[in-house]
Image (tube, rainbow, N blue to C red):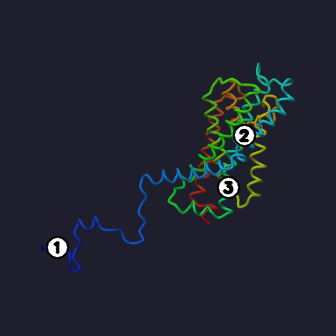
Amino acid sequence: MADAADSGRPGAEPSSAKAIGSRPSPGRRKAPSLAAPSVGFRTLLAKEVLRFWKVSFQTVAAPVLTGVLYLLVFGHVLQDRVEVFPGVGYTAFLIPGLVMMSLLQNAFANSSSSLIQSKITGNLVFVLLPPISNREFFAAYVAAAIVRGLVVGVGVFAVTVWFAPPPFEAPAWIAVFALAGAALLGVLGLIAGIVSDKFDQLAAFQNFVIMPATFLSGVFYSVHGLPPFWQFVSHLNPFFYMIDGFRYGFFAVADTNPWLSLAIVLAALAAASAVALAMLARGYKIRS
């Protein structure tokens, strides 16, 4: 009874039981549980996947048609005139390059277009308000870009493979370079979306950086057929290593060692990821 009386007197020290079970002061935010980050990531990922899937006729079917048109034009013209690898027809050689080119371009387009649209329309604030960490934000956008890139790549392959079925000499390399390439372009798209303030700036990045880099990376030719100077320039292009390593998975023949290609692609992915995460941590052109 004495303890109960003392605890009610002004200036008396509160009991330990009351201190542990006391309610937090008003306005104090409760720390998120361990399950909250994964829920936020899954929600944002689902939102980004649904965003492109709802207009799949534009985001999936159109790139597949473009890849088929490239195959019909270049394959018809060069099939009997060019043999890049011994025993490999030009059409079969071209298919992996077109698949990877479509995969890379659409992975970039997904993350970049989503972010720039959210910035321009003003609904990015609804993504930033929930307690989603920078890494979850980064991972959700990049994962959605990977999904779209893989869906388009599989679509292009499913349609073009009937023209000249290529072999599958090393399927593991196909999967590794497809995932690494889609991830790298998803990160680059995220960076482009962060830096750009309007569609014109994003279009310039895509038309003057991404498009030339993919077309000049050995999609339609082997770099061994180029003069020495242009071979050197091609080896400075990280897109070349993605496409060359991806093609190695089909024919077990490549212009460079696939382990070297993988090391360069992973190094570029790590560097781009560090830049993107640093921008997100600062809130560069997102929170300001």
**Residue that numbered label 1 is attached to:** 4
Mark found first going from the N terminus, 3 or 2: 2
**Residue that numbered label 2 is attached to:** 102
Q: In which quarter of the image is the C terminus?
A: bottom right
Q: Residue at x 65, y 41 (%)?
A: 182
- Of residues 28 and 277, the one nearer the viewer is 28
Q: Which residue is drawn at 43% across and 58% down?
A: 32
- Judge from the rendering whether residue 114 lies leftward or rightward of residue 74; answer left or right: left
Three-letter residue code for mark 2:
Ser
Reply above or below: 240 against 165.
below
Front tag of 3 and 2: 2
Where is residue 238 shown, x and y percent of the image? 70, 40
The quadrant holding residue 14 is: bottom left
For label 1, the crowd category at 10 Å Cα-Cα, with few meaning under 14, some 14 to 19 and many 20 or more, is: few
**Residue that numbered label 3 is attached to:** 193
Q: What element carries label 3?
A: helix
Proximity of marks 3 and 1: CB atoms separated by less than 8 Å? no
